Image: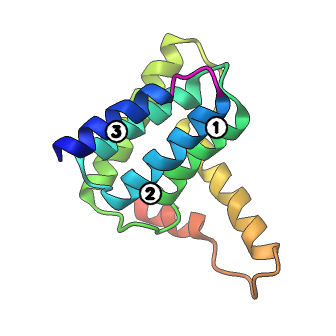
Amino acid sequence: RQFLRRCVGRLESALNDPSPLVRKSAVGILQAVVLEEPQSDVALQVCLQFVDRVVDREETDHVKGLTLDLFRKLWVSGAVEFNRTICTHMIQSVRYFEKRRTQFRIDSDSLLAQVVERAKTVWEKEATGGRGGRKSNPVDAALERWA
């Protein structure tokens, strides 16, 4: 655990690097860590760092999209079992987003709305991308889980 925290700490500092390529790489590695240990306190720490990427006006659309992909995988796609801990992390991330959005006077959709929109876009690409028949829409299933 201590090793994981040190590695995550170094990768989190890379999220603030001036280079979009460095930030993109850090997002990819951190995303893999969170998906491997989605119920850990490290996962929540990373999610909150990713929220900062989403509200950063100067962040590239590509890096923002990658950060939204983590939330999509955690909350919508069924990549991990949606349980009480994941739900708690989701609520904390959404609250933190609202706090940061107000603090920086960001006029944007809510975090959940952005995640759902990202999930719809990805699902449509996958469903029409020649990968066989249409799959069921994971967004509908996620909205039922959240209700």
* Residue 94 seen in the current view: yes
Magenta stretch: dominant secondary structure: loop
Circle nearer the viewer, 2 or 1: 1
Residues at marks 3 and 2 touching, judged by CB atoms closer than 8 Å: no
Q: Earlier in the sequence, mark 3 or mark 2?
A: 3
Q: Amino acid at mark 1?
A: Val
Question: Which sits in the foreground, 73 or 99?
Answer: 73
**Callout 3: 10 Å neighbours few (<14), some, many (20+)?**
many
The percent coordinates of residue 109 (x first, y second) are 63, 33
Q: Quadrant of the C terminus?
A: bottom left
Kindly identify the residue that appears in the image at 61 percent across and 18 percent down: 106
Residue 120 left/right relative to 22:
right
Q: Quadrant of residue 114?
A: top right
Q: Nearer the viewer, mark 3 or mark 1?
A: 3
Residue type, numbered disc 3:
Val
Disc on res. 63: 1
Dot 3: element: helix
As for residue 17 lying within the magenta part, the answer is yes
- Disc 2 crowd, CA 10 A, few/some/many (<14, 14-19, 20+): many
Above-or-below relation of 95 to 27: above
Q: Please give the residue where the numbered disc 3 appears in the rendered image.
A: 8
- Mark 2 secondary-structure assignment: helix
Task: Judge by depth and name the residue closer to the eye, 24 or 105.
Answer: 24
Please tell me whether residue 8 is drawn above or below residue 126 in the rendered image.
above
Which residue of the protein is positioned furthest toward the bottom in this rendering? Answer: 133
Q: Write the start and end of the magenta stretch as one range.
A: 15-19
